[in-house]
Image (cartoon, grey):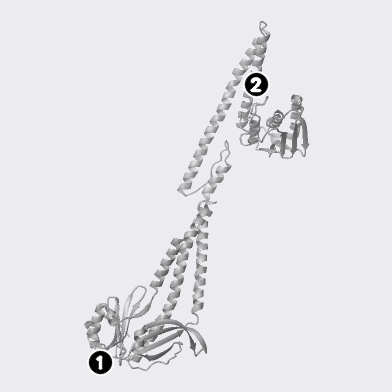
Protein backbone atom coordinates (compact mmCIF):
# COMPACT_ATOMS: atom_id res chain seq x y z
CA UNK A 1 0.00 0.00 0.00
CA UNK A 2 2.85 2.34 0.87
CA UNK A 3 4.45 1.60 -2.47
CA UNK A 4 1.26 2.39 -4.32
CA UNK A 5 0.85 5.72 -2.58
CA UNK A 6 4.49 6.52 -3.27
CA UNK A 7 4.12 5.61 -6.93
CA UNK A 8 1.01 7.76 -7.31
CA UNK A 9 2.71 10.65 -5.53
CA UNK A 10 5.72 10.35 -7.84
CA UNK A 11 3.57 10.38 -10.94
CA UNK A 12 1.55 13.27 -9.58
CA UNK A 13 4.60 15.47 -8.95
CA UNK A 14 6.07 14.50 -12.30
CA UNK A 15 2.87 15.39 -14.09
CA UNK A 16 2.32 18.68 -12.31
CA UNK A 17 5.94 19.69 -12.85
CA UNK A 18 5.89 18.72 -16.47
CA UNK A 19 2.73 20.64 -17.10
CA UNK A 20 3.72 23.79 -15.23
CA UNK A 21 3.76 25.61 -18.50
CA UNK A 22 3.69 29.26 -17.62
CA UNK A 23 5.49 32.53 -17.64
CA UNK A 24 7.66 33.80 -14.87
CA UNK A 25 8.68 37.44 -14.82
CA UNK A 26 12.43 37.89 -14.48
CA UNK A 27 14.83 40.83 -14.47
CA UNK A 28 17.31 41.47 -17.21
CA UNK A 29 20.19 40.10 -15.15
CA UNK A 30 18.45 36.72 -14.91
CA UNK A 31 18.72 36.21 -18.66
CA UNK A 32 21.47 33.90 -19.97
CA UNK A 33 24.76 35.79 -20.51
CA UNK A 34 24.65 35.35 -24.24
CA UNK A 35 21.22 36.97 -24.35
CA UNK A 36 22.36 39.88 -22.22
CA UNK A 37 25.30 40.46 -24.57
CA UNK A 38 22.94 40.33 -27.52
CA UNK A 39 20.66 42.95 -25.96
CA UNK A 40 23.61 45.18 -25.07
CA UNK A 41 24.96 44.91 -28.63
CA UNK A 42 21.83 45.51 -30.67
CA UNK A 43 19.47 47.31 -28.32
CA UNK A 44 21.77 49.45 -26.18
CA UNK A 45 19.29 52.30 -25.90
CA UNK A 46 16.08 50.34 -25.55
CA UNK A 47 14.30 50.04 -22.27
CA UNK A 48 12.82 46.73 -21.21
CA UNK A 49 9.11 46.79 -20.49
CA UNK A 50 8.76 43.12 -19.56
CA UNK A 51 11.12 40.14 -19.44
CA UNK A 52 9.81 36.63 -18.92
CA UNK A 53 10.93 33.05 -18.71
CA UNK A 54 8.71 30.42 -20.26
CA UNK A 55 8.91 26.91 -18.80
CA UNK A 56 7.42 24.30 -21.09
CA UNK A 57 7.30 20.53 -20.79
CA UNK A 58 10.62 19.96 -22.49
CA UNK A 59 12.17 23.35 -23.05
CA UNK A 60 12.99 26.67 -21.48
CA UNK A 61 12.83 29.95 -23.34
CA UNK A 62 13.02 33.64 -22.59
CA UNK A 63 11.32 36.63 -24.12
CA UNK A 64 11.90 40.32 -23.70
CA UNK A 65 9.49 43.10 -24.71
CA UNK A 66 10.90 46.59 -25.06
CA UNK A 67 8.98 49.74 -24.33
CA UNK A 68 8.78 50.46 -28.08
CA UNK A 69 6.94 47.18 -28.70
CA UNK A 70 9.91 45.21 -30.04
CA UNK A 71 10.20 41.65 -28.89
CA UNK A 72 13.18 39.29 -28.73
CA UNK A 73 12.99 35.59 -27.90
CA UNK A 74 15.87 33.44 -26.73
CA UNK A 75 16.32 29.71 -26.31
CA UNK A 76 17.68 27.93 -23.23
CA UNK A 77 21.28 28.81 -24.05
CA UNK A 78 20.57 32.46 -24.83
CA UNK A 79 20.68 32.26 -28.61
CA UNK A 80 17.99 34.39 -30.20
CA UNK A 81 15.17 32.56 -31.91
CA UNK A 82 12.98 35.54 -32.85
CA UNK A 83 13.37 39.28 -33.19
CA UNK A 84 10.18 41.20 -34.04
CA UNK A 85 10.04 44.97 -34.29
CA UNK A 86 6.49 45.21 -35.65
CA UNK A 87 6.78 47.98 -38.24
CA UNK A 88 10.32 49.27 -37.53
CA UNK A 89 13.36 47.81 -39.26
CA UNK A 90 15.62 45.54 -37.19
CA UNK A 91 18.95 46.89 -35.91
CA UNK A 92 21.73 46.23 -38.38
CA UNK A 93 23.76 43.04 -37.89
CA UNK A 94 21.08 40.67 -36.62
CA UNK A 95 20.08 39.35 -40.04
CA UNK A 96 22.75 36.91 -41.33
CA UNK A 97 24.82 38.29 -44.20
CA UNK A 98 23.76 35.58 -46.67
CA UNK A 99 20.10 36.49 -46.16
CA UNK A 100 20.51 40.23 -46.31
CA UNK A 101 22.45 39.78 -49.58
CA UNK A 102 19.46 38.01 -51.13
CA UNK A 103 17.09 40.68 -49.81
CA UNK A 104 19.27 43.54 -51.10
CA UNK A 105 19.35 41.88 -54.53
CA UNK A 106 15.62 41.18 -54.78
CA UNK A 107 13.96 43.92 -52.71
CA UNK A 108 16.46 46.82 -52.55
CA UNK A 109 13.95 49.16 -50.83
CA UNK A 110 12.65 46.75 -48.24
CA UNK A 111 13.95 46.23 -44.76
CA UNK A 112 13.57 43.37 -42.30
CA UNK A 113 11.02 43.87 -39.52
CA UNK A 114 10.95 40.37 -38.14
CA UNK A 115 13.27 37.38 -38.20
CA UNK A 116 12.51 33.97 -36.73
CA UNK A 117 14.68 30.88 -36.81
CA UNK A 118 14.78 27.31 -35.65
CA UNK A 119 17.16 24.46 -36.43
CA UNK A 120 15.63 23.93 -39.86
CA UNK A 121 14.55 27.23 -41.29
CA UNK A 122 14.76 30.97 -41.01
CA UNK A 123 11.69 33.15 -41.68
CA UNK A 124 12.08 36.81 -42.53
CA UNK A 125 9.33 39.46 -42.78
CA UNK A 126 9.98 42.61 -44.74
CA UNK A 127 8.54 46.12 -44.52
CA UNK A 128 6.67 45.51 -47.79
CA UNK A 129 4.82 42.61 -46.09
CA UNK A 130 6.69 39.96 -48.06
CA UNK A 131 7.69 36.87 -46.10
CA UNK A 132 10.75 34.87 -47.11
CA UNK A 133 11.77 31.41 -45.93
CA UNK A 134 15.35 30.19 -46.02
CA UNK A 135 16.64 26.69 -45.32
CA UNK A 136 19.61 26.01 -43.06
CA UNK A 137 22.03 26.56 -45.93
CA UNK A 138 20.67 30.10 -46.25
CA UNK A 139 19.01 29.32 -49.58
CA UNK A 140 15.68 30.94 -50.40
CA UNK A 141 12.97 28.25 -50.45
CA UNK A 142 9.67 30.12 -50.20
CA UNK A 143 8.21 33.56 -50.84
CA UNK A 144 4.84 34.56 -49.46
CA UNK B 1 -9.08 -22.74 -6.46
CA UNK B 2 -8.80 -23.26 -10.17
CA UNK B 3 -5.57 -22.29 -11.90
CA UNK B 4 -7.30 -19.68 -14.05
CA UNK B 5 -8.99 -18.04 -11.07
CA UNK B 6 -5.70 -18.06 -9.22
CA UNK B 7 -3.81 -16.43 -12.07
CA UNK B 8 -6.52 -13.81 -12.63
CA UNK B 9 -6.52 -12.96 -8.93
CA UNK B 10 -2.80 -12.28 -9.10
CA UNK B 11 -3.21 -10.33 -12.28
CA UNK B 12 -5.82 -7.93 -10.95
CA UNK B 13 -3.61 -6.22 -8.36
CA UNK B 14 -0.72 -5.17 -10.65
CA UNK B 15 -3.14 -4.29 -13.45
CA UNK B 16 -5.22 -2.15 -11.14
CA UNK B 17 -2.05 -0.42 -9.96
CA UNK B 18 -0.68 0.18 -13.45
CA UNK B 19 -3.96 1.29 -14.94
CA UNK B 20 -4.81 3.30 -11.85
CA UNK B 21 -1.56 5.26 -11.91
CA UNK B 22 -1.87 5.63 -15.64
CA UNK B 23 -5.46 6.94 -15.33
CA UNK B 24 -4.51 9.44 -12.65
CA UNK B 25 -1.61 10.68 -14.76
CA UNK B 26 -3.80 10.81 -17.84
CA UNK B 27 -6.47 12.78 -16.01
CA UNK B 28 -4.03 15.36 -14.65
CA UNK B 29 -2.22 15.75 -17.97
CA UNK B 30 -5.47 16.32 -19.81
CA UNK B 31 -6.92 18.83 -17.34
CA UNK B 32 -3.60 20.63 -17.14
CA UNK B 33 -3.39 20.76 -20.89
CA UNK B 34 -6.86 22.30 -20.92
CA UNK B 35 -5.84 25.11 -18.57
CA UNK B 36 -2.59 25.47 -20.43
CA UNK B 37 -4.39 26.02 -23.69
CA UNK B 38 -6.48 28.80 -22.16
CA UNK B 39 -3.38 30.39 -20.62
CA UNK B 40 -1.56 30.28 -23.93
CA UNK B 41 -4.44 32.08 -25.62
CA UNK B 42 -4.46 34.72 -22.90
CA UNK B 43 -0.71 35.12 -23.22
CA UNK B 44 -0.84 35.67 -26.96
CA UNK B 45 -3.73 38.07 -26.54
CA UNK B 46 -2.03 40.12 -23.81
CA UNK B 47 1.28 40.23 -25.66
CA UNK B 48 -0.54 41.52 -28.70
CA UNK B 49 -2.21 44.28 -26.70
CA UNK B 50 0.97 45.28 -24.88
CA UNK B 51 3.03 45.49 -28.03
CA UNK B 52 0.34 47.37 -29.95
CA UNK B 53 0.00 49.84 -27.17
CA UNK B 54 3.78 50.27 -26.67
CA UNK B 55 4.33 50.85 -30.37
CA UNK B 56 1.60 53.47 -30.27
CA UNK B 57 -0.85 51.70 -32.51
CA UNK B 58 -4.57 51.76 -32.02
CA UNK B 59 -5.84 49.19 -29.55
CA UNK B 60 -8.58 46.69 -30.40
CA UNK B 61 -12.02 46.99 -28.83
CA UNK B 62 -12.03 46.05 -25.20
CA UNK B 63 -14.44 43.20 -25.97
CA UNK B 64 -14.24 41.41 -29.28
CA UNK B 65 -16.19 38.55 -30.79
CA UNK B 66 -14.20 35.92 -28.92
CA UNK B 67 -15.62 37.24 -25.62
CA UNK B 68 -12.10 38.04 -24.49
CA UNK B 69 -12.03 41.29 -22.55
CA UNK B 70 -9.22 43.40 -21.24
CA UNK B 71 -8.55 46.57 -19.32
CA UNK B 72 -5.41 48.45 -18.50
CA UNK B 73 -4.67 50.74 -15.62
CA UNK B 74 -1.65 52.62 -14.41
CA UNK B 75 -0.09 51.51 -11.14
CA UNK B 76 2.44 53.09 -8.87
CA UNK B 77 6.06 51.84 -8.84
CA UNK B 78 5.48 50.64 -5.26
CA UNK B 79 2.63 48.46 -6.39
CA UNK B 80 4.81 47.16 -9.16
CA UNK B 81 7.51 45.98 -6.80
CA UNK B 82 4.96 44.34 -4.52
CA UNK B 83 2.89 42.39 -6.99
CA UNK B 84 3.87 39.51 -9.21
CA UNK B 85 4.41 40.70 -12.73
CA UNK B 86 2.55 37.81 -14.34
CA UNK B 87 -0.35 36.20 -12.57
CA UNK B 88 -3.20 33.86 -13.44
CA UNK B 89 -6.42 33.32 -11.54
CA UNK B 90 -9.99 32.06 -11.78
CA UNK B 91 -12.71 34.59 -11.19
CA UNK B 92 -16.39 35.14 -11.89
CA UNK B 93 -16.76 38.03 -14.28
CA UNK B 94 -19.72 39.75 -15.82
CA UNK B 95 -20.04 38.89 -19.49
CA UNK B 96 -22.09 41.56 -21.26
CA UNK B 97 -23.07 39.33 -24.19
CA UNK B 98 -24.65 36.82 -21.81
CA UNK B 99 -25.88 39.37 -19.28
CA UNK B 100 -24.66 37.33 -16.34
CA UNK B 101 -21.62 36.34 -14.34
CA UNK B 102 -19.56 33.54 -15.73
CA UNK B 103 -16.42 31.81 -14.56
CA UNK B 104 -13.38 33.14 -16.36
CA UNK B 105 -9.63 32.72 -16.52
CA UNK B 106 -7.88 36.02 -15.77
CA UNK B 107 -4.29 36.98 -16.52
CA UNK B 108 -2.51 40.02 -15.11
CA UNK B 109 0.67 41.36 -16.69
CA UNK B 110 2.62 44.28 -15.33
CA UNK B 111 4.87 46.14 -17.72
CA UNK B 112 6.68 49.47 -18.07
CA UNK B 113 5.97 52.23 -20.56
CA UNK B 114 8.86 54.11 -22.16
CA UNK B 115 7.95 57.21 -20.19
CA UNK B 116 8.66 55.25 -16.99
CA UNK B 117 5.07 54.68 -15.90
CA UNK B 118 3.94 51.27 -14.75
CA UNK B 119 0.85 49.61 -16.13
CA UNK B 120 -1.16 46.55 -15.34
CA UNK B 121 -2.99 44.74 -18.09
CA UNK B 122 -5.76 42.36 -17.18
CA UNK B 123 -7.14 40.00 -19.81
CA UNK B 124 -10.04 37.65 -19.28
CA UNK B 125 -11.59 34.84 -21.19
CA UNK B 126 -14.77 33.06 -20.12
CA UNK B 127 -14.48 29.34 -19.43
CA UNK B 128 -18.15 28.29 -19.35
CA UNK B 129 -17.55 24.67 -20.14
CA UNK B 130 -14.46 24.10 -18.06
CA UNK B 131 -16.12 22.14 -15.25
CA UNK B 132 -18.19 20.12 -17.68
CA UNK B 133 -15.12 19.27 -19.71
CA UNK B 134 -13.17 18.29 -16.62
CA UNK B 135 -15.95 16.08 -15.29
CA UNK B 136 -16.31 14.52 -18.74
CA UNK B 137 -12.60 13.79 -18.74
CA UNK B 138 -12.86 12.28 -15.27
CA UNK B 139 -15.82 10.07 -16.15
CA UNK B 140 -14.32 8.91 -19.43
CA UNK B 141 -11.01 8.17 -17.76
CA UNK B 142 -12.79 6.04 -15.17
CA UNK B 143 -14.85 4.26 -17.81
CA UNK B 144 -11.70 3.67 -19.81
CA UNK B 145 -9.98 2.25 -16.74
CA UNK B 146 -12.80 -0.18 -15.98
CA UNK B 147 -13.25 -1.22 -19.60
CA UNK B 148 -9.51 -1.74 -20.09
CA UNK B 149 -9.32 -3.81 -16.93
CA UNK B 150 -12.28 -5.97 -17.94
CA UNK B 151 -11.04 -6.40 -21.49
CA UNK B 152 -7.51 -7.33 -20.41
CA UNK B 153 -8.79 -9.80 -17.82
CA UNK B 154 -11.31 -11.21 -20.28
CA UNK B 155 -8.67 -11.71 -22.96
CA UNK B 156 -6.27 -13.17 -20.41
CA UNK B 157 -8.89 -15.60 -19.09
CA UNK B 158 -9.80 -16.67 -22.60
CA UNK B 159 -6.18 -17.23 -23.62
CA UNK B 160 -5.41 -18.99 -20.36
CA UNK B 161 -8.40 -21.33 -20.52
CA UNK B 162 -7.61 -22.18 -24.14
CA UNK B 163 -4.01 -22.93 -23.39
CA UNK B 164 -4.55 -25.07 -20.31
CA UNK B 165 -7.12 -27.30 -21.99
CA UNK B 166 -4.66 -30.21 -22.50
CA UNK B 167 -3.86 -30.13 -18.77
CA UNK B 168 -7.50 -30.67 -17.82
CA UNK B 169 -7.78 -33.38 -20.42
CA UNK B 170 -4.88 -35.27 -18.81
CA UNK B 171 -6.47 -34.80 -15.38
CA UNK B 172 -9.79 -36.19 -16.59
CA UNK B 173 -7.97 -39.07 -18.25
CA UNK B 174 -6.15 -39.96 -15.02
CA UNK B 175 -9.41 -39.72 -13.06
CA UNK B 176 -11.18 -42.15 -15.37
CA UNK B 177 -8.26 -44.57 -15.54
CA UNK B 178 -9.07 -48.03 -14.19
CA UNK B 179 -6.23 -50.40 -13.57
CA UNK B 180 -6.24 -53.29 -15.99
CA UNK B 181 -8.30 -51.41 -18.54
CA UNK B 182 -6.05 -48.77 -20.09
CA UNK B 183 -7.41 -46.51 -22.80
CA UNK B 184 -5.26 -44.54 -25.22
CA UNK B 185 -4.71 -40.90 -24.21
CA UNK B 186 -6.05 -38.69 -26.99
CA UNK B 187 -4.61 -35.26 -26.23
CA UNK B 188 -3.13 -33.53 -29.25
CA UNK B 189 -1.12 -30.45 -28.34
CA UNK B 190 1.70 -28.30 -29.74
CA UNK B 191 2.88 -27.22 -26.32
CA UNK B 192 6.15 -28.92 -25.38
CA UNK B 193 5.31 -29.12 -21.67
CA UNK B 194 1.91 -30.72 -22.27
CA UNK B 195 3.40 -33.08 -24.83
CA UNK B 196 5.94 -34.10 -22.20
CA UNK B 197 3.15 -34.56 -19.66
CA UNK B 198 1.24 -36.75 -22.12
CA UNK B 199 4.30 -38.90 -22.67
CA UNK B 200 5.04 -39.21 -18.96
CA UNK B 201 1.45 -40.16 -18.17
CA UNK B 202 1.31 -42.70 -20.98
CA UNK B 203 4.64 -44.20 -19.96
CA UNK B 204 3.61 -44.32 -16.30
CA UNK B 205 0.37 -46.09 -17.10
CA UNK B 206 2.17 -48.52 -19.38
CA UNK B 207 4.48 -49.50 -16.48
CA UNK B 208 1.59 -49.86 -14.03
CA UNK B 209 -0.20 -52.09 -16.51
CA UNK B 210 2.91 -54.17 -17.02
CA UNK B 211 3.42 -54.77 -13.30
CA UNK B 212 -0.27 -55.48 -12.82
CA UNK B 213 -0.25 -57.97 -15.67
CA UNK B 214 2.83 -59.74 -14.31
CA UNK B 215 1.26 -60.05 -10.85
CA UNK B 216 -1.97 -61.41 -12.29
CA UNK B 217 -0.12 -63.97 -14.36
CA UNK B 218 1.95 -65.01 -11.37
CA UNK B 219 -1.08 -65.71 -9.19
CA UNK B 220 -2.78 -67.60 -12.01
CA UNK B 221 0.32 -69.67 -12.75
CA UNK B 222 1.12 -70.32 -9.12
CA UNK B 223 -2.35 -71.56 -8.25
CA UNK B 224 -2.43 -73.63 -11.41
CA UNK B 225 0.92 -75.24 -10.58
CA UNK B 226 -0.19 -75.91 -6.99
CA UNK B 227 -3.28 -77.86 -8.07
CA UNK B 228 -1.51 -81.15 -8.96
CA UNK B 229 0.81 -81.43 -5.91
CA UNK B 230 -2.15 -80.70 -3.63
CA UNK B 231 -4.29 -83.36 -5.28
CA UNK B 232 -1.44 -85.87 -5.07
CA UNK B 233 -0.98 -85.03 -1.41
CA UNK B 234 -4.68 -85.59 -0.72
CA UNK B 235 -4.68 -88.91 -2.53
CA UNK B 236 -1.63 -90.14 -0.62
CA UNK B 237 -3.29 -89.37 2.69
CA UNK B 238 -6.41 -91.20 1.54
CA UNK B 239 -4.32 -94.22 0.60
CA UNK B 240 -2.55 -94.07 3.93
CA UNK B 241 -5.86 -94.02 5.81
CA UNK B 242 -6.77 -97.33 4.14
CA UNK B 243 -3.88 -98.97 5.99
CA UNK B 244 -5.43 -101.15 8.70
CA UNK B 245 -2.36 -101.12 10.91
CA UNK B 246 -2.90 -97.46 11.91
CA UNK B 247 -4.06 -96.64 15.38
CA UNK B 248 -7.18 -94.60 16.16
CA UNK B 249 -4.99 -91.66 17.19
CA UNK B 250 -3.05 -91.67 13.94
CA UNK B 251 -6.24 -91.90 11.90
CA UNK B 252 -7.63 -88.82 13.61
CA UNK B 253 -4.47 -86.87 12.85
CA UNK B 254 -4.64 -87.96 9.22
CA UNK B 255 -8.30 -86.88 9.00
CA UNK B 256 -7.38 -83.41 10.32
CA UNK B 257 -4.59 -83.22 7.76
CA UNK B 258 -7.03 -84.26 5.08
CA UNK B 259 -9.37 -81.48 6.14
CA UNK B 260 -6.61 -78.82 6.10
CA UNK B 261 -5.50 -79.91 2.65
CA UNK B 262 -9.14 -79.75 1.54
CA UNK B 263 -9.28 -76.14 2.70
CA UNK B 264 -6.02 -75.45 0.90
CA UNK B 265 -7.44 -76.90 -2.32
CA UNK B 266 -10.58 -74.78 -2.00
CA UNK B 267 -8.49 -71.69 -1.44
CA UNK B 268 -6.36 -72.49 -4.44
CA UNK B 269 -9.46 -73.04 -6.56
CA UNK B 270 -10.84 -69.71 -5.50
CA UNK B 271 -7.61 -67.97 -6.43
CA UNK B 272 -7.66 -69.68 -9.80
CA UNK B 273 -11.27 -68.64 -10.24
CA UNK B 274 -10.35 -65.05 -9.40
CA UNK B 275 -7.53 -64.98 -11.89
CA UNK B 276 -9.83 -66.54 -14.53
CA UNK B 277 -12.38 -63.80 -13.94
CA UNK B 278 -9.70 -61.14 -14.18
CA UNK B 279 -8.39 -62.70 -17.37
CA UNK B 280 -11.89 -62.44 -18.82
CA UNK B 281 -12.22 -66.16 -19.43
CA UNK B 282 -15.97 -66.14 -18.78
CA UNK B 283 -17.10 -64.65 -22.04
CA UNK B 284 -20.29 -66.62 -22.56
CA UNK B 285 -23.26 -64.31 -21.92
CA UNK B 286 -26.86 -65.38 -21.43
CA UNK B 287 -29.99 -63.88 -19.91
CA UNK B 288 -29.57 -64.47 -16.18
CA UNK B 289 -32.48 -64.26 -13.75
CA UNK B 290 -31.01 -62.90 -10.54
CA UNK B 291 -34.19 -63.56 -8.54
CA UNK B 292 -34.07 -67.25 -9.43
CA UNK B 293 -30.37 -67.40 -8.52
CA UNK B 294 -31.14 -65.75 -5.23
CA UNK B 295 -33.88 -68.31 -4.40
CA UNK B 296 -31.69 -71.27 -5.25
CA UNK B 297 -28.69 -70.00 -3.26
CA UNK B 298 -30.90 -69.16 -0.27
CA UNK B 299 -32.31 -72.63 -0.28
CA UNK B 300 -28.83 -74.18 -0.29
CA UNK B 301 -27.26 -71.85 2.26
CA UNK B 302 -30.15 -71.95 4.73
CA UNK B 303 -29.53 -75.67 4.93
CA UNK B 304 -25.77 -75.27 5.31
CA UNK B 305 -26.12 -72.62 8.01
CA UNK B 306 -29.29 -74.05 9.60
CA UNK B 307 -27.50 -74.29 12.91
CA UNK B 308 -27.13 -70.48 13.10
CA UNK B 309 -30.92 -69.97 13.02
CA UNK B 310 -30.86 -66.85 10.89
CA UNK B 311 -34.06 -65.08 9.84
CA UNK B 312 -34.13 -64.15 6.18
CA UNK B 313 -36.38 -61.28 5.05
CA UNK B 314 -36.61 -61.20 1.28
CA UNK B 315 -38.22 -58.13 -0.29
CA UNK B 316 -38.81 -58.65 -3.98
CA UNK B 317 -39.70 -55.28 -5.47
CA UNK B 318 -39.15 -56.42 -9.04
CA UNK B 319 -37.59 -58.87 -11.41
CA UNK B 320 -33.91 -58.41 -12.36
CA UNK B 321 -32.67 -60.17 -15.43
CA UNK B 322 -29.49 -59.16 -17.17
CA UNK B 323 -27.17 -60.31 -19.91
CA UNK B 324 -24.19 -61.86 -18.11
CA UNK B 325 -22.29 -65.04 -17.51
CA UNK B 326 -24.45 -67.54 -15.69
CA UNK B 327 -21.67 -69.06 -13.61
CA UNK B 328 -20.36 -65.68 -12.53
CA UNK B 329 -23.78 -64.45 -11.45
CA UNK B 330 -24.34 -67.60 -9.40
CA UNK B 331 -20.99 -67.05 -7.74
CA UNK B 332 -21.76 -63.37 -7.14
CA UNK B 333 -25.06 -64.06 -5.38
CA UNK B 334 -23.60 -67.02 -3.51
CA UNK B 335 -20.58 -65.08 -2.28
CA UNK B 336 -22.67 -62.13 -1.11
CA UNK B 337 -25.06 -64.38 0.76
CA UNK B 338 -22.28 -66.50 2.20
CA UNK B 339 -20.58 -63.34 3.38
CA UNK B 340 -23.76 -62.25 5.15
CA UNK B 341 -24.25 -65.67 6.74
CA UNK B 342 -20.68 -66.01 7.91
CA UNK B 343 -20.55 -62.58 9.46
CA UNK B 344 -23.92 -62.79 11.23
CA UNK B 345 -24.29 -63.76 14.84
CA UNK B 346 -26.53 -66.74 15.59
CA UNK B 347 -30.28 -65.84 15.61
CA UNK B 348 -29.60 -62.59 13.68
CA UNK B 349 -31.46 -61.54 10.58
CA UNK B 350 -30.52 -60.81 6.99
CA UNK B 351 -32.52 -58.38 4.83
CA UNK B 352 -32.45 -58.83 1.10
CA UNK B 353 -33.93 -56.32 -1.33
CA UNK B 354 -34.13 -56.92 -5.01
CA UNK B 355 -35.59 -54.86 -7.82
CA UNK B 356 -34.75 -54.27 -11.44
CA UNK B 357 -31.11 -53.23 -11.66
CA UNK B 358 -30.28 -53.44 -7.96
CA UNK B 359 -29.67 -56.03 -5.31
CA UNK B 360 -28.81 -55.27 -1.69
CA UNK B 361 -28.01 -57.60 1.12
CA UNK B 362 -27.87 -56.30 4.70
CA UNK B 363 -26.77 -58.20 7.77
CA UNK B 364 -26.92 -56.89 11.31
CA UNK B 365 -23.58 -56.25 12.90
CA UNK B 366 -22.26 -56.10 16.41
CA UNK B 367 -19.27 -54.04 15.39
CA UNK B 368 -18.25 -50.81 13.79
CA UNK B 369 -18.34 -49.99 10.08
CA UNK B 370 -15.72 -51.76 7.98
CA UNK B 371 -12.96 -50.15 5.99
CA UNK B 372 -14.74 -49.55 2.70
CA UNK B 373 -11.42 -49.02 0.93
CA UNK B 374 -9.83 -52.36 1.83
CA UNK B 375 -12.99 -54.42 2.21
CA UNK B 376 -12.75 -55.85 -1.29
CA UNK B 377 -9.02 -56.60 -1.08
CA UNK B 378 -7.87 -60.19 -1.12
CA UNK B 379 -7.46 -61.77 2.30
CA UNK B 380 -8.87 -58.77 4.11
CA UNK B 381 -10.77 -60.09 7.08
CA UNK B 382 -11.87 -57.11 9.13
CA UNK B 383 -10.97 -57.64 12.80
CA UNK B 384 -11.62 -61.26 13.68
CA UNK B 385 -11.11 -64.49 11.85
CA UNK B 386 -14.38 -66.22 11.13
CA UNK B 387 -14.53 -69.89 10.44
CA UNK B 388 -15.44 -70.77 6.89
CA UNK B 389 -14.13 -67.54 5.51
CA UNK B 390 -11.04 -67.49 3.37
CA UNK B 391 -11.01 -63.72 2.85
CA UNK B 392 -11.56 -63.99 -0.89
CA UNK B 393 -15.36 -63.86 -1.10
CA UNK B 394 -15.70 -60.13 -1.45
CA UNK B 395 -12.78 -59.80 -3.80
CA UNK B 396 -14.50 -62.34 -6.02
CA UNK B 397 -17.67 -60.24 -5.82
CA UNK B 398 -15.64 -57.19 -6.82
CA UNK B 399 -13.90 -59.00 -9.67
CA UNK B 400 -17.19 -60.38 -11.01
CA UNK B 401 -18.79 -56.94 -10.85
CA UNK B 402 -15.90 -55.39 -12.74
CA UNK B 403 -15.93 -58.12 -15.35
CA UNK B 404 -19.72 -57.84 -15.79
CA UNK B 405 -19.79 -54.01 -15.71
CA UNK B 406 -21.78 -53.86 -12.48
CA UNK B 407 -21.15 -51.67 -9.47
CA UNK B 408 -20.73 -52.94 -5.95
CA UNK B 409 -20.79 -50.63 -2.95
CA UNK B 410 -20.66 -50.94 0.80
CA UNK B 411 -22.52 -48.85 3.37
CA UNK B 412 -23.05 -49.03 7.09
CA UNK B 413 -26.47 -47.83 8.23
CA UNK B 414 -28.35 -48.38 11.49
CA UNK B 415 -25.99 -51.11 12.63
CA UNK B 416 -26.17 -52.99 9.35
CA UNK B 417 -23.52 -53.80 6.80
CA UNK B 418 -25.17 -53.25 3.46
CA UNK B 419 -23.70 -54.57 0.22
CA UNK B 420 -25.34 -53.27 -2.88
CA UNK B 421 -24.92 -54.39 -6.47
CA UNK B 422 -26.29 -52.14 -9.18
CA UNK B 423 -25.92 -51.97 -12.90
Residue in front for this viewpoint, B127 or B408: B127
Q: Quadrant of residue B37?
A: bottom left
Is residue B114 positioned above or below B305 on the image? Answer: below
- Marker disc for residue A109: 1
Indicate the position of residue B187 as horizontal and vertical percent values: 52, 46
Q: Quick check: B375 above or below A57?
A: above
Q: Where is residue B138? Give x, y as percent.
A: 50, 72
Q: Chain of mark 1?
A: A
Establish if B170 lies above or below B241: below
Report which residue position mark 2 lands on.
B263
Q: Quadrant of the C terminus of chain A?
A: bottom left
Tell whether A53 sits left or right of A99. Answer: right
Q: CA distance from mark 1 to mark 2?
A: 138 Å
**Please, what secondary structure does the residue beneath circle 2 have?**
helix
Q: Are marks 1 and 2 on the same chain?
A: no
Callout 1 touching callout 2 (CB < 8 Å): no
Residue B159 visible from this viewpoint: no
State the image quarter where residue B244 is shown: top right
Amino acid sequence: MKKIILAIACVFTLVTNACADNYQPISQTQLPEKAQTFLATYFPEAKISLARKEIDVMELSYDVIFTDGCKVEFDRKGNWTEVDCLTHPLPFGIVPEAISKVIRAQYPDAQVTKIERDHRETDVKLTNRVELTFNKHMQLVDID
Amino acid sequence: MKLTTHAIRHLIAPLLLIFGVWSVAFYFILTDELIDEIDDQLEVYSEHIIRQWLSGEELPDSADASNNTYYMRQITPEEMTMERKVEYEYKNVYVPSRLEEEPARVMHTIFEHHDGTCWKLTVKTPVYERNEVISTILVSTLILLVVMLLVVIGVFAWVFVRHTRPLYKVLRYLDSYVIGRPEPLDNVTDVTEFEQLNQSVTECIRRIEEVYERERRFIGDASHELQTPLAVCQNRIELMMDDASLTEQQLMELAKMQQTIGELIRLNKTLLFLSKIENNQYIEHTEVDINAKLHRQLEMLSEVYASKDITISLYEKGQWTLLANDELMASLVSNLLRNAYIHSQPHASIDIYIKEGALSIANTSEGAPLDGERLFDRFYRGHQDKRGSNGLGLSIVKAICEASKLKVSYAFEQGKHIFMVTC
